[in-house]
Amino acid sequence: MALCHARIGENTPVSYSVFIALYAVSVAVGIVAGLAVMVGWRNISLSRFVESARYNLVYIAIIVGAPLLVLIEHAVASVEPNSKEVVYTNWLFSIGGNAIRILQDRLDYQVLADFSILIYVWVFAFIIYFTPILLLALDDRTTFRRYSIAMLFNYLVLLPFYIFFPVTVTGFYADSGMTPLLYIDTHWGRIVTSVDPLNNDFPSAHISLVVTALLVLISAGVDYRRYYYFLACSAIGITFSVLYLGVHWLADVFAGFVLAVGAYVVSGNESVQMTFDRYVRRLSSIFKKRERRKSSA
């Protein structure tokens, strides 16, 4: 992987702050373009979007708040390393660890590395932000509820594994023979390392979150056909990218798929949905009462 290593690690012509700004703008533009394609300009209503957001306020808080728990865990993990990390990583390396190195060695192409990084960082971020925005734009409250429950289930399972079962990324595990293609990139890699302690591998959140979105949207019906086709292609691309770039082990990917199926099944249970929604509606009523008091005052 000498060629990829040398070229990816070169300095880019823009500063990191400018790069981050361009990255954020590109994701925002992508979301707007995605709404135009998936919903259509004529069907986009700001008032409907706002009303849907007000109705789903608690669910939105869940979608936004759940990832924050993982970020807090990342901060704690960076201060107090887990002594079992090497042991757990050895276990996963014994399960097909060499197969990933062979994949990287056989596909030593710079353009493939760059494309994989784009999928891993940009496409994944786009899906995470765009999916709930799309559901709000369409005011699909039933699917939004199921998607929120499924996302919460993902994070509730991911967090204990990240705390008690830390696993090093493949690119930074000496015995793997992998090149950390993602992390040696000057700017793309820095985006990841700024929020990731590089030992939260099992299960793969990239896989579980994207596949969960895919399964939920497929179950929502043909109205989402174009988007879940996009999600299916993205899931394939992300699966390849997390292995090729030196991020995840085969076991991480498999566990990510299993977690996604579990989230899909749990979120589709009617009793779970109704119980969850009952508590959400109670919280929503509390917020509405407070708003009325403030407005009357």
Image: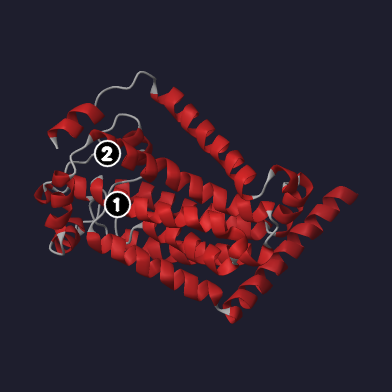
Question: Residue, x 19% and y 44% (percent of image)?
Answer: 107
Q: Which residue is mark 2?
A: 113
Image: 44 above or below 277: above
Question: Residue, x 48% and y 66% (percent of image)?
Answer: 215
Please identify the quarter of the rendering in which residue 284 is found.
bottom right
Horizontal relation, residue 257 to residue 179: left or right: right
Q: Nearer the viewer, residue 93 or 157?
A: 93
Please identify the quarter of the rendering in which residue 96 is found.
bottom left
Q: Nearer the viewer, residue 228 or 258?
A: 228
Task: Give neighbour class at mark 2: few <14, some 14-19, many 20+ (Cα, 10 Å).
Answer: many
**Farthest right residue in view:** 296
Question: Residue, x 61% and y 49% (percent of image)?
Answer: 38
Numbered tag placed on residue 240 in the rendering: 1
Which amino acid type is shown beneath numbered disc 1?
Answer: Phe
Image: 187 above or below 115: above
> Which one is earlier in the sequence, the residue at label 2 or at label 1?
2
